[in-house]
Amino acid sequence: MGKKRLVVLTGAGISAESGISTFRDSDGLWNEYRVEDVATPEGFYRNPKLVLDFYNDMRKDLKNHQPNYGHIALKELEDDFDVKIITQNVDDLHERAGSSSIIHLHGELMKVCSSKDTSLVTTLPSMESEIHVGDKASDGSQLRPFIVWFSEPVPMIEPAIEWVEQADIFLIVGSSLVVYPAAGLVHYLRREVPIYVIDPKPVTVPSSRPIYMIQKGASEGMKEFKSMVLAKE
């Protein structure tokens, strides 16, 4: 018999412990910028230089942040489970922690794409890489951040749904479950699959099944989750 499939949805809370500010604060700002200005197609067309500089700065800042034990524990669980990570985060901390199966629902800071065809993607060579107005994709269009902005479709949601449909255990770490379509992934779980939630704040899960809530930060919560699931194996 193969390993059980542990499917994990991670949100801003797992990276917040590494010092990365959350995508959207309660005051509607992202790193002190209005979300409308730096995370919408309209903002990009209105002021592409502002948007490109914003993501250039975010990319450079990544080197100041390291995976925390929340990320590392997910890698460690690969010894006992088939771990699939679906993340709402655009950082590369899961990759740097060594996890092997990751879907980024909202894009990746370390990649850029064509502004005409977002499936034309290029991985940047380093965190110091910068993209400027006039830098072109292979189709001749302006390069843009490979980020799913507000109002844009989420192309990786279908592969994520397929993973969730095959889950034996579903774990949510650091996601408030208010951003769709990610929040709707729980509806694709088989009836008997348990849901675990790690978050220091209460999280409302749109499901009638029992929820195992671990009200702690990512690192401490993952220690407790590991003990719980390994004791059942």
Image (spheres, rainbow, N blue to C red):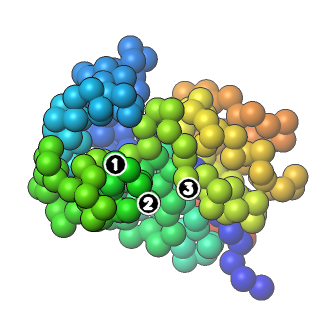
Image coordinates for residue 213, horizontal then vertical, percent: 66, 39
Q: CA distance from mark 1 to mark 3?
A: 18 Å
- Amino acid at the residue labelled 2: Ser
| Secondary structure under the numbered disc 1 in the rendered image | loop
Q: Is residue 120 left or right of residue 74?
A: left
Residue beneath disc 2: 119
Q: Is residue 208 left or right of residue 153?
A: right
| Residue at the extreme front of the image, as rendered | 140
Q: Is residue 129 left or right of residue 115?
A: left
Mark 1 crowd level (few <14, some 14–19, many ≥20, 10 Å Cα): many
- For the point 59% across and 29% down, which residue is it? 178
Residue beneath disc 3: 156
- For the point 65% across and 56% down, which residue is it? 158
User: Looking at the image, which is closer to me, 120 or 112?
Assistant: 120
Q: Is residue 112 left or right of residue 50?
A: right
Work out whether mark 2 precedes mark 3 in sequence or the reverse, and give the earlier one: 2
Q: CA distance from mark 2 to mark 3?
A: 11 Å
Q: Quadrant of residue 192?
A: bottom right
Residue beneath disc 1: 115
| Secondary structure under the numbered disc 2 in the rendered image | loop
- Amino acid at the residue labelled 1: Ser
Q: Quick check: can you spot residue 225?
A: no
Q: Quick check: can you spot residue 4?
A: yes
Q: Quadrant of residue 79?
A: bottom right
Q: Quadrant of residue 170?
A: bottom right
- For the point 77% across and 85% down, which residue is it? 1
Image coordinates for residue 26, horizontal then vertical, percent: 43, 17
| Secondary structure under the numbered disc 3 in the rendered image | loop
